[in-house]
Amino acid sequence: SVERTSNVQDLYKLGLGYDMPSEQVDGMDLEAVHHALAKAADHIRSGKGPYYLEIKTYRYRGHSVSDPGNYRTKDELNAYKDRDPIKEVEEKMIKNKIASQKEITAIGDKIKAEIEEAVKFAEESDFPLGSELYDDNYVQKDYPFIMD
């Protein structure tokens, strides 16, 4: 946890030490995330330099299948599940007549099919060669710390 590994609990404050615009965003609020990302992207694209965003969200599952999750209560977990960002967006879409429940279900089914297709492709594909490790990671091909 951040509390055990850093004296700075609010990670967005790390950017302030570099005179970098920095902001903490509720990652469970998709509209807040959208607005913060748009603001940061505008700042960066206008040539004003980097922008530090700490987007705080919640992990529903443990770190692995062997993680019993004893570090949180069921009430805490359920409180965050009640604020699930996907569920909230779906509810807003229905309320504002952007989509029906049937359309949202169809979108979910399409997404699940795309994920299953991607997983199948990954499982059936060969592992990349070690020499390809840094391909497509950086726009700049001669990144200083990559040694051939």
Image (cartoon, rainbow, N blue to C red):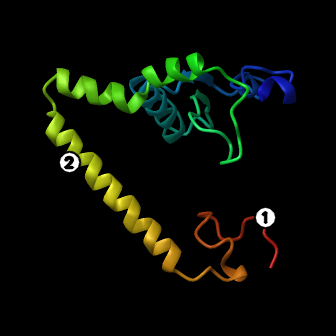
Residue 54: horizontal and vertical position, in percent? 62, 29
Q: Is residue 100 left or right of residue 131?
A: left
> What residue does disc 1 label?
144
Q: Earlier in the sequence, mark 2 or mark 1?
A: 2
- Marks 2/1 in contact by CB < 8 Å: the verdict is no
| Residue nearer the viewer, 59 or 52 | 59
Nearer to us of marks 2 and 1 is 2
Above or below — where is 17 with respect to 63?
Answer: above
Q: Quadrant of residue 141?
A: bottom right
| Type of amino acid under label 2 | Ala
Q: 10 Å neighbourhood of mark 1: few (<14), some, or many (≥20)?
A: few
| Residue nearer the viewer, 94 or 79 | 79
Q: Residue at x 48, y 27 (%)?
A: 36
| Type of amino acid under label 1 | Pro
Q: Quadrant of residue 146?
A: bottom right
Q: Residue at x 68, y 25 (%)?
A: 12
Q: Quadrant of the N terminus?
A: top right
Residue 49: horizontal and vertical position, in percent? 62, 37
Q: Is residue 55 left or right of residue 10?
A: left
